[in-house]
Image: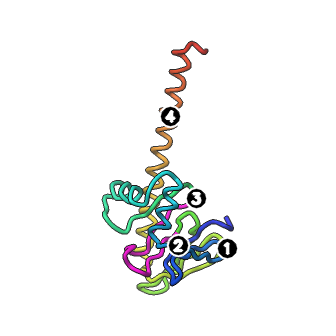
Amino acid sequence: MGDKMKYIKRSSQGTMFSRKNKVYIPKGLKQYINELCISNLSTFQGREKAAGILLSRKSILPIYVNKDICLFPTESIRNYDCIYINYNELLSFKGLSSNETKIIFYDLSEISVNISYEKIKKQVVRVQTILAKKNTMWKHERKCFHYIVIIGIYSLNLV
């Protein structure tokens, strides 16, 4: 899991994302996440809207990018200190105080965020809800596809 994106946040140089090393790019946070979504045939706005519908929420929503990147914000994206954590690289988290939590990634690197343990826990549950829904829909789509293929084979007398 070593070189996967762990988190994304704003920096004085634009946006910083963490892999094995910190990488700085001269783009805005939302612009960069939108580009990740576009490379996976969606948009930030589309993913945000879908998450909002699935979770019955309007703000501070997780963004599913692809099977390796599912981001959740620590706070509103409008706040400069917002950090998007990649759920797929999250090993654990631990409350340090009433408004500070340590995030531990699979490579055992850590960051501290100014958000309570309970809020992180809620965000993790939201991501898990989206992933469970996606997995359920994917299994249903695969079953439908196999059914259509089988019907097509029989209707073409290929068996």
User: Pointer 2: what residue?
Assistant: 8
- Gap between marks 4 and 2, in whole Å? 36 Å
**Dot 1: few (<14), some (14–19), or many (≥20) neighbours within 10 Å?**
some
Instruction: Please state which of the two labelled residues, at mark 4 or mark 1, is closer to the viewer.
Output: 1
- Sequence-wise, which precedes: disc 3 or disc 2? 2
Instruction: Please state which of the two labelled residues, at mark 4 or mark 2, is closer to the viewer.
Output: 2
User: Pointer 4: what residue?
Assistant: 143
- Sequence-wise, which precedes: disc 1 or disc 2? 2
Task: Locate residue 158: give its quadrant.
Answer: top right
Instruction: Please state which of the two labelled residues, at mark 3 or mark 4, is closer to the viewer.
Output: 3
The label number, if any, that marks residue 20 in the structure image: 1
Image location of residue 86, percent across then percent down:
53, 67
Magenta range: 69-85
Q: Do the residues labelled 3 and 4 touch (CB within 8 Å)?
A: no
Q: Do the residues labelled 3 and 2 touch (CB within 8 Å)?
A: no
Q: Nearer the viewer, residue 4 or 94?
A: 4
